[in-house]
Image (cartoon, coloured by chain):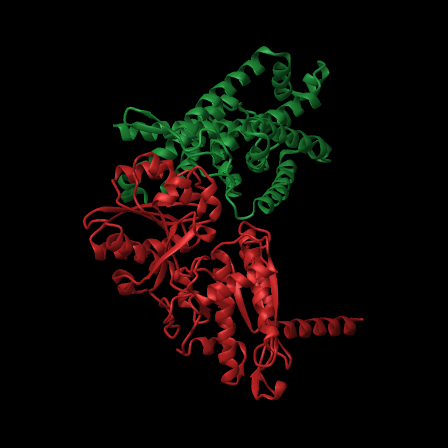
Chain colours: A green, B red
Amino acid sequence: MSYFLEQVLNGLSYGLVLSLIAAGFAIVFTSTGVLNFAHGSIVLLGAYLVAVLHDTIGFWPAVLVGLLGAAVVGVLINMLLVRHLADPNPGTAAILMLGVDIVLLTELTRRIGNQVLTLGAPWGASVVRLGDVTLPTGRVLAAGVTVVAFAGLWYLFSRTDLGVGMRAAAADGPTASLMGIRLSRTAATGWALAGILAAVAGIFLTSFPAPGVAPTVALSAFAAIPAWVLGGFDSVPGAVVGGLLIGLTSALVTGYEAELEPFLGAGFGEVAPYVVMIVVLLVRPSGLMGSKEAVRV
Amino acid sequence: MKHRVRAATLAAAALALAACSTTAPTASGGGGDDVTTGNGVTDSGITIGMITDLSGPFAAGAAVQVTETQAYWDQVNADGGICDRDVTVDVQDHGYDPQRAVTLYRSMAPDVVALQQVLGGPTSAAVLPLAEQDGVYVGGVGWAGSALAYENNQLPGASNAIQAANAVDYMVDELDVPEGSSIGVVYFTGDYGGDALAGAEHAAEERGLEVVAQEITSQTTDLSAQASALAQADVAGVVLAAAPTQLASLAGVLSAQGADVPIIGMNPTFNPSLLTTPAADALLANAYSMTSVSPYDNADSAGVQAANELYASAAPDGAVGWEVPLAYVQAELLKQALEGACESGDLTPEGVVAAFRDGGEVDTEGVLPDGLDYSEVGQSPTTTVFVSKVSRDAEAGLELLDQVSGPSAESFSYGG
């Protein structure tokens, strides 16, 4: 029983980190209609900044720089590239983002080399024990921070003018613009928020139980894509549910691989998120919480 | 007008054919010898190729290998070259893209006598069959058993299955893993991991152990779920065929769960920078490395010392690690093949392949185990591997413990 519980808690805490990334995808999509395939590199960028700076300025200031750095790069991508697209449809923007991803990832890979950079997180490799269940402290913290982050997002979107403006812009841009909402401002806020969420996720994806910052982290971020898609392309709550579902599925399928292997074959844990995504989309083509008219490519 | 178009088409076709064709061997009197030469060899020079990854995921390690390789051949040229000819290395970048690797191979093949390296599993899998058809030597493709089937491929030491079988033998013989217990095998999907799993399963059967297998990909950087499953199965040791990130995560989580069992990683699973991560203590306590090539810190091997000195003078601030002796020995293997081809008077691509397959002695001065045998296509050239322990005292983090050839490694046979 404690084994089952351990895998469930492992899965949920990992799922919450994935949901941070998935929420970033969803926020960028709703605020600017862009499928941001450079998001994985921004996750890596946030973690990289913390890894290279923590020795000189300390861990927490480095975290601040990491979050700001990722936000600024997001805003710059939007300001310098996305806004100047001659043909602003999601397909063109998606291809542009693939290009941005290649450039960012190549440069970060070059800088990281074949090292695994440590993050210098003060929680190190410590663990929390709840009865028979052992959980890495980093994951418990991640769960707490994620819950706080989503509470903050909820407050922003439902209680502030800026957030309501962002929702209005997402629902109907031209009308929102006529009502006096500055689309450039809501778009920049969306990209900045996504960047911050990406950097937070990057920090937790690269601290214990993961060893540190390596270029593959950008690829791990793609594990959040099924969470984003099955949650509905344009829904932040959907991203949270999607993340939890994917995290839980991965952990349980991997944890019970020995029992499942005779039916499903080896390594099913890697495929399971996509199977869940396809099943959900067959039943609910707009995702769990997506709006029906969301544009897809 | 029509004539001119036709003539131009013919000329273009002829040009294309000429570019594709391989040069017919010619008897050469260059340097006063009587050697038959072919692609990549002139009277004064020999060109060898290296198709590597300078812009993709393995760029950093590949750069170390390129530096070492250049330094090695510069040294050979300074000592008089091969067959009275200077050796030039043509380095090209495939960016870990198999299609680009094939295109590069096609363009390089007419101008090189051999390829010292085609880095990467999927990239070398694309190039090997083409190079075999052309009779071109290919080295440095890693240690996957699938590459052994190619006559033109020279594996630098024991294959992945042999490393994994030795890892299991070592656990039983030296690390007190009792008969009847379970061991974990965590492996990358694909040639590398699949081959290691085959070796570990064979050895487990021979030694009366149960295998708990966990398949992962390079994207799996958090091995919590896998580690919990292994701890739940009460494994007495783990064989790991993955990369450094996975080694650190697995060691850290297993240790946090109180499962302090030995973890033996294959060739590329250790990187010295892991000793700066939070998993360092767990690695120092439990991690071993089972490698085909000697680790960087090996005072008893003249070859390793020579490799390290070359690298230190070529890149004084360069990152050190297992890539240094590996690149050195890949160049050394090709050098011996070229010298063999020269001696037998056939310095053509086919001559180079025949030279390393002739069953003659290969001496790498301790960078690879002694007694390498390349005469049998399809089998690992040796069953001996190097065992090292993660240590802060050793350069590049690995302290050499022993060279071993376990009973299961010796009884393992491909296709058998």
Q: Is residue B11 above or below residue A212?
A: below
**In the image, B22: left or right of B185?**
right
Q: Residue at x 41, y 55 (%)?
A: B267
Residue A250 falls in which quadrant of the image? top left
Q: Which of A188 and A234 is in front in this view?
A: A188
Tell me where residue B204 appears, x and y as whole percent. 25, 53
The N terminus of chain B lies in quadrant: bottom right
Q: Residue at x 61, y 89 (%)?
A: B32
Q: Which of B355 and B388 is in front in this view?
A: B388
Tell me where residue A35 appears, x and y as whole percent. 59, 33
Residue B10 falls in which quadrant of the image? bottom right
Q: Which residue is drawn at 47% across and 53% down?
A: B395
Tell me where residue A91 appears, x and y as whole percent. 62, 37
Q: Which of A260 and A3 is in front in this view?
A: A3
Q: Is residue B100 above or below residue B337?
A: above
Q: Nearer the viewer, residue A53 or A240?
A: A53
Residue A283 in view: no
Residue A244 in view: yes
